[in-house]
């Protein structure tokens, strides 16, 4: 079955339990994503990799009671979390693999994704499948990370990249993982091979003031694969790096460097 590793990763009990503490970081990117999508009342929308449903709900606000929004996630635990939260009748959450499965509610006027496009084993196959579910003049919009080096909130990944351990999911170029779509040329190649036009890209620098323990803890380092024997060293290095973005009250102002892609099926 495709994407088994991601299915297991995002259904891990510890990660699911921690998910609400990560959402505040990713939520700040919903606004530029939905600005790019320009959703209107009555539209049908699919949210790929919906997680806990935060972008799904905001999309529902924009399309209104005459529209419809389907939140899709490969993780049954994430779908359960999203479903447990209050949501209007126009929202439906579905467990599915957007790389291979038929998606209910198609054709969609817009497919959106808040940090969900980077985790497909076969991005070209995934974009082909998404294209099959778009209306003829539908559009695809996704927010993805810029390179890891510019994103201090990914401290576990940064420490792993410096030799403390190997982090999962993967690295910054080409592999499956948080930063797999950091390289815009690679993503455009995927899109064109899948029948889409090259994307229009908009870059955003966002700030989400946070407590230190929302950014990094020894437990999050361990969870990301840092070896227990060096976790104290990794934590100390992370704290040192965060000093530059920490104010006198102890609030951490992490830069969140993201980019929003927008595209349509090629003519």
Image (tube, grey):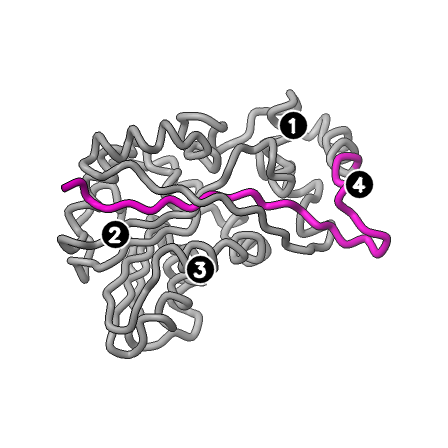
- Of residues 16 and 34, the one drawn nearer to the viewer in this rendering: 34
Say whether marks 3 and 4 touch (CB < 8 Å).
no
Mark 1 → mark 2, Cα distance in angstroms: 43 Å
Locate residue 199, reporting x and y percent: 32, 40
Q: CA distance from mark 3 to mark 2?
A: 23 Å
Name the residue carrying label 1.
227
Residue 1: percent from the left, percent from the top?
24, 36
Q: Which residues are magenta?
A: 240-267
Q: Disc 4 versus disc 1: distance between alpha carbons?
A: 23 Å
Q: Which mark is residue 139?
A: 2
Secondary structure under the numbered disc 2 in the rendered image: strand
Q: Disc 1 on helix, strand or loop?
A: loop
Q: In the figure, is residue 212 to the left or right of 36? A: right
Q: What residue is at 52 percent from the left and 52 percent from the top?
A: 26
Q: Are marks 1 and 2 in contact (CB under 8 Å)?
A: no
Q: Which residue is mark 4?
A: 243
Where residue 148 appears, x then y in whole percent?
Answer: 56, 33
Label 2 vs 4, first from the N-terminus: 2
Name the quadrant of the C terminus: top left
Instruction: Give yes or no for residue 252 being in the magenta stretch.
Output: yes
């Amino acid at each position: 079955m495709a994407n088994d590793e991601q299915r297991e990763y995002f259904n891990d009990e510890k990660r699911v339990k921690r998910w609400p503490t990560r959402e505040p970081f990713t939520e700040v990117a919903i606004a530029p994503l939905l600005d790019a999508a320009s959703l209107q009342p009555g539209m049908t929308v699919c949210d790929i990799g919906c997680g806990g449903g935060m972008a799904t709900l905001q999309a529902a606000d924009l399309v209104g009671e005459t529209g419809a929004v389907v939140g899709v996630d490969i993780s049954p635990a994430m779908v359960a979390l999203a479903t447990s939260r209050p949501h209007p009748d126009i929202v439906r959450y579905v467990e599915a693999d957007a790389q291979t499965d038929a998606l209910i509610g198609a054709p969609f006027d817009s497919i959106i994704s808040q940090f969900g496009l980077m985790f497909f084993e076969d991005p070209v196959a995934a974009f082909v499948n998404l294209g099959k579910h778009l209306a003829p003049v539908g559009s695809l919009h996704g927010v993805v990370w810029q390179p890891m080096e510019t994103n201090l909130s990914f401290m576990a990944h940064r420490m792993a990249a410096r030799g403390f351990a190997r982090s999962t999911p993967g690295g910054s170029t080409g592999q499956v993982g948080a930063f797999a779509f950091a390289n815009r040329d690679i993503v455009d190649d995927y899109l064109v091979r899948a029948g889409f036009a090259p994307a229009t890209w908009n870059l955003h620098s966002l700030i989400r003031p946070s407590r230190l323990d929302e950014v990094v803890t020894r437990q999050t380092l361990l969870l990301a694969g840092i070896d227990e024997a060096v976790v104290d060293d990794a934590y100390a290095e992370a704290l040192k790096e965060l000093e530059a973005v920490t104010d006198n009250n102890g609030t951490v102002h992490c830069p969140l460097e993201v980019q929003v892609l927008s595209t349509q099926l090629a003519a």
